[in-house]
Amino acid sequence: MIELKNVHKTFTRKEMTIEALKGINLKVEKGDIFGVIGYSGAGKSTLIRLVNYLERPTQGQVLVAGRDLGTYNDKELRAAKKSIGMIFQHFNLLESKKVFDNVAIPLVLLKKNKNEIRKRVQELLEFVGLSDKAGSYPNELSGGQKQRVGIARALASNPSILLCDEATSALDPQTTQSILQLLKRINAEYNITVMIITHEMSVIQEICNKVAVMEEGRIIEQGSVLEVFGHPQHATTQNFVKTVIQNSMTPSVQKSIKDKHGNLLYKLNFVGENASEPILYEMIRSCDIKFNILFANMTEIQETTLGTMIIQIHGDRSQVDKALDLLKRHEVGVEEVESYVLDINNK
Ligand SMILES: Nc1ncnc2c1ncn2[C@@H]1O[C@H](COP(=O)(O)OP(=O)(O)O)[C@@H](O)[C@H]1O
Ligand SMILES: [Mg+2]
C-alpha cells in the first residue's frame, strides 16, 4: 500500500544541511494501522509528509499503491493526493468558516455540486458524531471536537489512506481515547489504511498493529506491535515500552536480590495463549525445583495478553535446565537476568 525504499531527505538552510531522513525502508500493508514513534526531531513528520508528497525525497522512492509518486505528472499527483487524507496535531481548521464549510473544502475543490456536498458533509458529521455542530465555528468547539472536524474533512474525498501526524498530542487522555477509537472504526468500517505518527507509546499500544521506531532519521526497529512490545531490542524502544508496560521489579525486591548474589534469576515472557496456561504448575510438578516470583505483570496488546515475570529458581543445575527446557518448549521467552543488574530494562 505504502512503501518507502531507501528514502533520504536533506534540507538545506543557509548553508546548513540537515539530514532529516537517512535511508528509510518501510512497508505499510493495506488495512494496517501503522505507527511510527520517535522523539521530537527524529524525522517523523518529514516521513509522513513524503507519503502525500508534501515533501519530495532527496533520494529513494515513495510508492503508494505500487507506483512511485515521483513518476506522476501534476494531474495524476492531484488524483493520487485525493486518495490520501491527513489530520494534524493542531487540527488546521479555517477559523473563519463554519464546521460544515470546513468539512466541505475538499468537496468544493473537487467541484462537487451543492446537493452532493450537503449530503456527504451531513453523512461525515454524523459519522464523527458532530451532526449538531454543522453551524458552529471552530473556536466554539473543544479540542476533541475540532479533531473530529479534521477527521471528517480528511475523509470527505473517500481516501484509501489516512495519515495522522500527532493527531492526539494536543488532547487530554480521555479525548485521546475517543479519537483513537474513532480512527479504529475508520480503519475497520471503511477499510482505510492508517499511518500514525506519535511520540506516545500508549497510542501505539491502543490501536496499531505494526510499529516502526525512529531515531535521528533512521528506523531502528520495526515489526508487529506484539513483537516489538514483547521483545524490544534497542534501548530507545525499551524506553518507549517502559512508558506503558511496567516491567521492572520494585526497589525493595531489587535490593533483596542484590544482597543475595549467586541466585538464578530468569525473566519470562508469555505471549498470547501461553499466558493463560498452567505452565508454571507443570514446571514444578515435573522438575525438582522451587521458585519465587519476584515480579509479574500482564498487559493487553492487540487483544493479546503479554505477561512478564521474574522468577528466582532454586535447585540442582540439571533440574533447573530441565525446567527451562520445559518453558522454552511452551514458547515462553526465557532470559537469564544477572542478579547485580538492578534495572532489568537496561540489561
Ligand atoms: N522544512 C524544513 N527545513 C529545514 N529543516 C527541517 C524542515 N523540516 C524538518 N526539518 C528538520 O528535520 C529534522 C526532523 O524534523 P521532523 O521530521 O519535524 O521531526 P519530528 O516530526 O520527528 O519531530 C529536524 O532536525 C528538523 O529541524
Ligand atoms: Mg513532528
Image (spheres, rainbow, N blue to C red):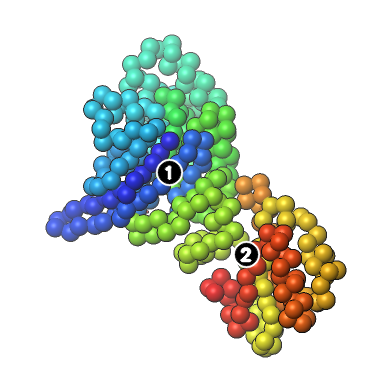
Q: Is residue 103 left or right of residue 109?
A: right
Q: CA distance from mark 2 to mark 1?
A: 30 Å
Which quadrant is the N terminus positioned in?
Answer: top left
Q: Amino acid at mark 1?
A: Lys
Mark 1, residue position: 27
Q: Out of 322 and 101, give the one closest to the viewer.
A: 322
Contact between labelled residues 1 and 2, with CB atoms less than 8 Å apart: no
Residue 166 visible in the snapshot: no
Q: Give the side of residue 319 with respect to residue 241, left or right.
A: right
Q: Amino acid at mark 2?
A: Gln
Q: Residue furthest right?
A: 285
Decide if residue 150 is on the left or right side of residue 131: left
Q: Earlier in the sequence, mark 2 or mark 1?
A: 1
Question: In this orientation, which residue lies closer to the viewer: 190 or 94?
Answer: 190
Q: Secondary structure at mark 2?
A: loop
| Circle number at residue 79 | none
Count the marks: how many? Answer: 2
**Res 78 quadrant in image:** top left
Give the residue displayed 39% in from the left and 41% down from the top.
3
Percent x, y of residue 5: 34, 46
- Which residue sits at x=26%, y=42%? 56
Choose top left, top right, bottom left or bottom right for residue 86.
top left
Element marked by disc 1: strand
Residue at screen point 32% across, 49% down: 6
The image shows residue 316 at horizontal and vertical percentages of 77, 82
Q: Is residue 6 above or below residue 280?
A: above
Q: Which residue is mark 2?
A: 246
Where is residue 161 drawn, in percent x and y? Answer: 44, 33
Residue at horizontal 80 percent and vertical 77 percent from the top: 289
Looking at the image, residue 345 lies above or below residue 332: below
Label 2 crowd (10 A; few <14 / some 14-19 / many >=20): few
